Image (tube, grey):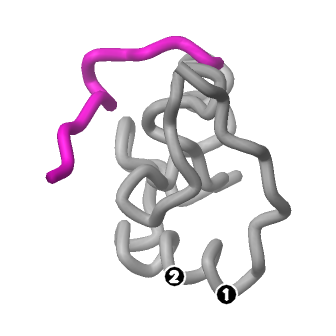
Amino acid sequence: MEKSPRIKMPPEVRQFVLNRDGGCCRSCGSTQNLEVDHIIPLAKGGTNDLSNLQTLCRPCNRRKKHYLDPRFKRRFT
């Protein structure tokens, strides 16, 4: 499995993901310290595609780290 390259996320993409996810963390519902996270980490073969991005608050994102958390794993076709 080849690692996807990390690219600088354009502000428009970040704002789209935050708006799509209702401006709250997909794990705990917090509206503070929001970050855009790769659901399947790049190191584990995830992509930079919008379908692999989600909004997490900083504490949930730090807890998830680079691991595949079954709460976040999704299948896209």
Q: Residue furthest right?
A: 8
Query: For the residue marked with disc 1, what is the amino acid?
Result: Glu
Which of 40/63 is in front? 40
Which mark, by number, is residue 63? Answer: none
Query: Residue at coordinates 38% horizontally, 38% vertically from top-left?
Result: 28
Query: Residue at coordinates 46% horizontally, 32% vertically from top-left?
Result: 40
* Residue of label 2: 16
SS state under label 1: helix
- Taking 27 as reference, is 62 above or below it? above
Q: Is residue 7 magenta?
A: no
**Where is residue 53 drawn, in percent x and y?**
48, 54
Q: Is residue 68 magenta?
A: yes
Query: Residue at coordinates 44% horizontally, 60% vertically from top-left?
Result: 24
Which of 10/76 is in front? 76
Which of 40/5 is in front? 5
Separation (CA) of disc 2 from disc 1: 6 Å
Q: Which stretch appears magenta?
A: 65-77
Q: Quarter of the image holding residue 21?
A: bottom left
Q: Quarter of the image holding residue 5?
A: top right
**Where is residue 69 drawn, in percent x and y?**
38, 16
* Residue of label 1: 12
Query: Residue at coordinates 66% horizontally, 53% vertically from top-left?
Result: 35
Q: Residue furthest front?
A: 2
- Taking 10 as reference, is 52 above or below it? above
Which of 74/1 is in front? 1
